[in-house]
Image: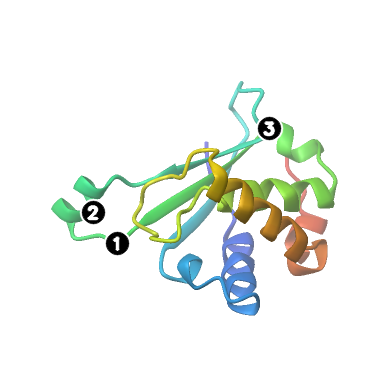
Amino acid sequence: MYARLASIEEEIREVATKYGLGHLLGVDVAVVYNPRSKSRAVARIWGLNKIFQVVYGWGPVYVIELLTPFARLSCEQRVKTLAHELAHIPATGSGSLRPHNKAFWRDYRRYSRLFSCGDFPSLQKLQLK
């Protein structure tokens, strides 16, 4: 059902290092493609609640789920989508998700300016069905 996209995960780590986005390096970010979703959304992000982190001894974990419409986007639109989902990760990297508030839009605009298709070569050649 889900296809893990490890190449994008690695590129997120590289971009976080390149642009000094340390809070993204302090958390685990997985990327999966869900070809069976019927949602009209392009992507969504999931965070692991603090209680699960404490009970199981895990650190903050996020999963970016790319949905069927993502496959039809241009590379530039895919990069903007990743920027959008990554902007939901707060600077605290606590596992919680940031809503569409002032800090979210600030980070989204910043990431959108910083990131390019060249930063995510796997998005250029990614063939999703």
Relative to the observer, which residue lies in front, 98 or 25? Answer: 98
* Local crowd size for mark 3, using a 10 Å CA cut-off: few (<14), some (14–19), many (≥20): many
> From mark 1 to mark 2, how far is it between C-alphas?
6 Å
Residue that mark 2 sits on: 53
Residue under pointer 3 = 68
Under mark 2, the amino acid is Gln
Is residue 129 in view?
no
Residue located at (46% from left, 67% from top): 23
Q: Position of residue 92 (x, y in %)?
A: 38, 60
For marks 2 and 3 on the same chain, the one whose residue lies earlier in the sequence: 2
State which quadrant residue 18 falls in.
Answer: bottom right
Under circle 1, the secondary element is loop
Camera-side residue of 89 and 60: 89
Neighbor class of circle 2 (other Cα within 10 Å; few <14, some 14-19, many 20+) is: some
Which residue is denoted by mark 1 in the rendering? 59
Q: Residue at x 81, y 57 (%)?
A: 125
Q: Amino acid at mark 3?
A: Thr
- Indicate the quadrant where residue 58 lies: bottom left
Badge 1 or badge 2: first in the primary sequence: 2
